[in-house]
């Protein structure tokens, strides 16, 4: 959303699942209100809850946003916390996502009075148990905690007329697990490869409930075998500056040359 843009009628994102998308979409009235504020050039506040925050990729991505970002980080791993405290000193650390309640969310919304809210989650599951259990001993708790938080936050924000956007990022999973996550989140996943944007190969699945940028639908193709969308960036957009001149010799330039493909002739590093 850019302040210079005029309000446009809300259209559902092209990657939605019609069977369950109604509850997953941002409130249309709240979204229309947000568009009017943006078109008027008003200063906007985005309240962000990042679950399993890791080392802060969420906050780096939001550096260039036009919103004033209120940062709420949920992370408990000591190494990740060290990076977050060093790189983002103003970040509010909220501990484990298991402490999230409807009352706590309502207080946060009423305190910060956001114009919009983003809930972001991250997982590394290769398969997903369909049982919706959030207990600490459950390996799949981070995903189901995200879903529970999304449901609680959606109710709170609708009562306050604030649109909710969500993003969940995960490793590539088997088809059955993708179906479980899609049914829970209400939108179909999009498979993306970091090699289209940078120097290493890393395929991930993302679920989100907002519109794609104009023209991006042409980059999507439906994979019937995995029941998800594939995003393939055009060559002229994903092309990177060659790194060969950076290295004076050794293994890396040789590795890059050997890893060249038709789509990525510069080569790519394999993510560990």
Image: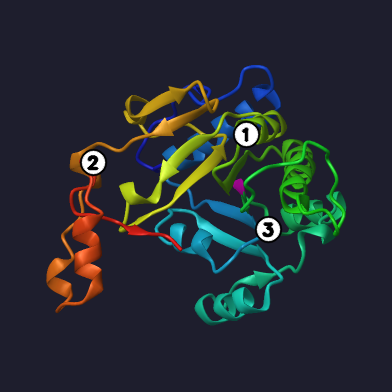
Instruction: Check if residue 117 falls in the magenta segment.
Output: yes
Residue occupying the point 85% across, 53% down: 101
Instruction: Check if residue 94 falls in the magenta segment.
Output: no
SS for dot 1: helix
Q: Is residue 82 above or below residue 94?
A: below
Name the main secondary structure of what is drawn in magenta.
strand
Q: Is residue 123 above or below residue 40?
A: below
SS for dot 3: helix
Q: Which residue is mark 3?
A: 112
Q: Percent position (x, y) of residue 75?
A: 68, 67
Residue occupying the point 32% across, 47% down: 196
Quadrant of the rendered image containing residue 187: top right
Tell which tag, 2 or 3, sits nearer the viewer. Answer: 2
Which mark is first along the chain, 2 or 1? 1
Question: Viewed as shown, does residue 134 lie left or right of 265?
Answer: right
Real-space CA distance between mark 3 and mark 1, rounded to the nearest whole angstrom: 35 Å
Disc 1 packing (10 Å; few <14; some 14–19; many ≥20): many
User: 271 and 185: which one is in front?
Assistant: 271
Which mark is first along the chain, 1 or 3? 3
SS for dot 2: loop
Question: Viewed as shown, does residue 212 lie left or right of 245?
Answer: right
Real-space CA distance between mark 1 and mark 2, rounded to the nearest whole angstrom: 26 Å
- In the image, which residues are magenta? 115-119
Q: Which residue is mark 2?
A: 263
Q: Percent position (x, y) of residue 259?
A: 26, 54
Disc 2 packing (10 Å; few <14; some 14–19; many ≥20): some
Quadrant of the rendered image containing residue 54: bottom right
**Labels 3 & 1 near each other (Cβ < 8 A):** no
- Position of the N terminus, as image quadrant, is top left
Disc number placed over residue 178 in the picture, else none = 1
User: 103 and 14: which one is in front?
Assistant: 14
């Amino acid at each position: 959303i850019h302040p210079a843009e005029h309000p446009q009628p809300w259209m559902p994102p092209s990657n939605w699942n019609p069977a369950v998308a109604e509850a997953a979409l941002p409130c249309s009235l709240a979204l229309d209100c947000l568009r009017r504020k943006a078109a008027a050039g008003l200063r906007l506040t985005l309240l962000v809850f990042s679950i399993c925050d890791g080392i802060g990729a969420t906050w780096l991505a939001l550096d260039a946003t036009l919103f004033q970002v209120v940062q709420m980080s949920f992370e408990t791993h000591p190494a990740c916390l060290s990076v977050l405290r060093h790189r983002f000193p103003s970040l509010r650390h909220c501990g484990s996502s298991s402490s999230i309640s409807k009352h706590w969310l309502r207080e946060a919304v009423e305190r910060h009075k956001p114009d919009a809210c983003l809930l972001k989650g991250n997982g590394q599951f290769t398969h997903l148990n369909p049982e919706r259990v959030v207990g600490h001993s459950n390996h799949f708790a981070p995903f189901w905690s995200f879903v529970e938080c999304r449901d609680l936050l959606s109710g709170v924000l609708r009562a306050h007329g604030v649109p909710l956007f969500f993003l969940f990022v995960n490793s590539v999973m088997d088809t059955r697990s993708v179906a479980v996550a899609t049914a829970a989140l209400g939108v179909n996943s999009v498979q993306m490869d970091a090699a289209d944007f940078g120097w290493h190969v890393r395929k991930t699945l993302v679920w989100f409930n907002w519109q794609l940028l104009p023209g991006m639908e042409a980059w999507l193709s439906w994979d019937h075998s995995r029941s998800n969308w594939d995003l393939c960036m055009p060559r002229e957009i994903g092309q990177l500056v060659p790194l060969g001149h950076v290295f004076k010799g050794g293994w890396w330039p040789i590795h890059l040359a050997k890893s060249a493909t038709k789509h990525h002739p510069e080569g790519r590093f394999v993510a560990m």
